[in-house]
Image: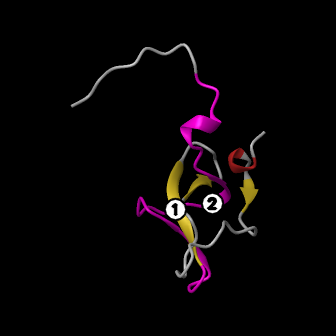
């Protein structure tokens, strides 16, 4: 499995954005796994931040996969304007 696609515990932080006080954007997963959101770790505040603005009990995170890392085939494409 690609390193970018694994789940990581909340006490292990994502890579920091160079020159900033926060991490790369990641997917944050709620404790019931029914909910997830984009988020980041704020190194200055020393806490996780969800971009959706709602309360989450984050249990793990993962990097956002890029399409070329995924094995997706058999889908028809559509053109959008």
Q: Estimate the x, y position of residue 81 in percent, counting from the top left.
A: 21, 31
Front residue (pair 79, 57): 79
Q: Is residue 52 left or right of residue 45?
A: left
Q: Estimate the x, y position of residue 42 in percent, counting from the top left.
A: 56, 77
Q: Residues within 10 Å of mark 2 (few under 14, many from 20)?
A: many
Front residue (pair 60, 43): 43
* Residue contact at pointers 1 and 2, CB within 8 angstroms: yes
Q: Is residue 30 magenta?
A: no
- Is residue 72 depicted above or below 13 in this figure? above
- Is residue 34 depicted above or below 13 in this figure? above
**Stretch in magenta:** 43-72
Q: Mark 2 = which residue?
A: 58
SS type, badge 1? strand
The residue located at (75%, 67%) in the rendering is 12
- Is residue 54 depicted above or below 76 in this figure? below
The residue located at (78%, 39%) in the rendering is 1
Dot 1 or dot 2, earlier in sequence? 1
Q: Estimate the x, y position of residue 49 in percent, counting from the top left.
A: 52, 69
Q: CA distance from mark 1 to mark 2?
A: 10 Å
Name of the residue lying farthest toward the left: 81
Question: Residue 23 falls in which quadrant of the image?
Answer: bottom right
Per the rendering, the mark at residue 39 is 1
SS type, badge 2? strand
- Is residue 58 depicted above or below 76 in this figure? below
């Amino acid at each position: 499995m690609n390193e970018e696609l694994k789940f990581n515990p909340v006490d292990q932080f994502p890579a920091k954005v160079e020159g900033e006080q926060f991490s790369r954007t990641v997917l944050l997963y709620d404790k019931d796994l029914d909910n997830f959101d984009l988020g980041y770790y704020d190194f200055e505040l020393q806490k996780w931040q969800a971009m959706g603005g709602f309360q989450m009990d984050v249990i793990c995170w993962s990097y956002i996969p890029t399409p070329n890392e995924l094995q997706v085939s058999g889908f028809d494409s559509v053109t959008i304007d």
